[in-house]
Image (cartoon, rainbow, N blue to C red):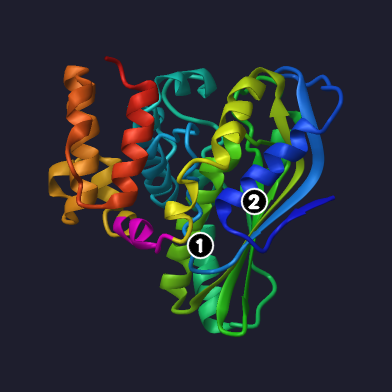
């Protein structure tokens, strides 16, 4: 089993990419040929933002913010996410909701709010080892028709030495598209839970039974690795968690796209920027200074690669 720990998010991710490329031959999967590392674990220390800032990776910061709010808010509506990434239509069975929506599964799908129940349990019994939140249900095993079966299956929570540890269990994770957003979104959930329980942040761990790289993404991965040594990827490696707490203070406004009501200027400017882009399809709207160096960097990287000119 591969274990990635003891360094910043960027470095651990780069090492995992390199390990994928050491595999001699791809194997078959339902969604295409993959280089499969098999069981793998990432462990992240408290206090460091787990958002990749590697040159040429160009994660979509608008989508990452929206997905985090979508999960915390317990949403399953497709239109909230495909506003940012239109291809999300491909994962919906009815073009209205997403069957495997993590927040909805945690908040409503099984008949009660698992998140609120876990918060209450750990407030009352800080030494409890019973807090296991489920996103994958028995019916998913026999569901042969849905396009969206949860990849992240469960979450385990424990308070150790006064700090909340979170462990996310994943059945199958795409290192290029899945891992980067998972690391951030579940860190937002981690911060939310710790804040609600009233404890410090502990370790964040992700265990996947199949960490893999699709053969079709090898070219992009090699570009990232070629630029790793000479790029400024370390610049934001130890960024504070400010962005996360911005999001947590504006869940409803983000989910309902009431961007003008967002109180924090950097977050408000960021989301309004994307709204202007959607309305006008003008890339120059991304030149505004949000007042936050991390958001400025992420927006510049994404807009240069993906925004229509």
- Residue at image position (49%, 52%) is 234
Relative to residue 266, is residue 19 depicted above or below? above
Alpha-carbon span between mark 1 and mark 2:
20 Å
Relative to residue 182, is residue 240 depicted above or below? below
CA neighbours of label 1 inside 10 A, class few (<14), some (14 to 19), many (20+): many
Residue identified by numbered label 2: 12
Query: To which quarter of the image does residue 79 belong?
Result: top left
For the residue pair 22 and 81, the one nearer the viewer reads as 22
The tally of labels here is 2
Q: Where is residue 302 in the image (x, y as percent from the top left)?
A: 38, 31
For the residue pair 255 and 114, the one nearer the viewer reads as 255
Q: Where is residue 64 in the image (x, y as percent from the top left)?
A: 41, 41
Kindly tell me whether residue 111 is visible in this rendering: no
Q: Where is residue 265 in the image (x, y as percent from the top left)?
A: 16, 52
Element on which disc 1 rests: helix
Kindly tell me whether residue 265 is visible in this rendering: yes
Report the side of 239 relative to 4 (left or right). Answer: left
Tell me which label, 1 or 2, sits earlier in the chain: 2
Q: Which segment did they paint magenta?
A: 239-246
- Residue at image position (47%, 37%) is 55
Element on which disc 2 rests: helix
- Residue at image position (59%, 36%) is 178
Q: Position of residue 207 (x, y in %)?
A: 72, 52
Relative to residue 287, is residue 233 depicted above or below? below
- Residue at image position (71%, 20%) is 215
Prevailing secondary structure class for the magenta stretch in the rendered image: helix
Q: Is residue 96 magenta?
A: no
Report the side of 309 relative to 203 (left or right). Answer: left
Residue identified by numbered label 1: 190
């Amino acid at each position: 089993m591969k274990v990635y720990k003891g360094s910043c998010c960027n470095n651990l991710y780069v090492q995992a990419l390199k390990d994928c490329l050491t595999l001699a031959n791809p194997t078959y999967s339902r969604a295409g040929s993959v280089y499969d590392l098999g069981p793998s674990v990432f462990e992240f220390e408290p206090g460091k933002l787990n958002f990749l800032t590697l040159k040429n990776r160009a994660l979509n910061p608008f989508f990452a913010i929206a997905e985090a709010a979508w999960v915390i808010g317990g949403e399953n509506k497709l239109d909230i996410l495909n506003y940012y990434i239109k291809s999300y239509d491909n994962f919906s069975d009815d073009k209205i909701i997403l069957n495997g929506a993590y927040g909805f599964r945690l908040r409503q799908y099984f008949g009660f709010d698992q998140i609120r129940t876990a918060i209450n349990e750990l407030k009352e019994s800080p030494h409890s080892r019973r807090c296991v939140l489920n996103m994958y249900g028995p019916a998913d095993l026999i569901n042969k028709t849905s396009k969206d079966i949860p990849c992240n299956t469960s979450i385990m929570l424990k308070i150790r030495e006064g700090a909340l540890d979170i462990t996310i269990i994943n059945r199958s994770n795409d290192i290029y598209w899945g891992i980067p957003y998972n690391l951030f979104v579940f860190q937002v959930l981690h911060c939310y839970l710790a804040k609600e329980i009233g404890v410090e942040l502990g370790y964040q761990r992700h265990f996947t039974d199949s960490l893999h790289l699709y053969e079709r993404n090898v070219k992009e991965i090699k570009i990232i690795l070629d630029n790793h040594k000479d790029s400024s990827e370390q610049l934001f490696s130890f960024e504070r968690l400010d962005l996360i707490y911005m999001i947590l203070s504006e869940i409803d406004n983000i989910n309902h796209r009431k961007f003008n009501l967002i109180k924090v200027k950097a977050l408000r400017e960021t989301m309004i920027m994307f709204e202007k882009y959607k309305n006008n399809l003008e890339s120059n709207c991304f030149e505004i200074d949000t007042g936050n160096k991390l958001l400025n960097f992420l927006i510049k990287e994404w807009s240069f690669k993906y925004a229509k000119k």
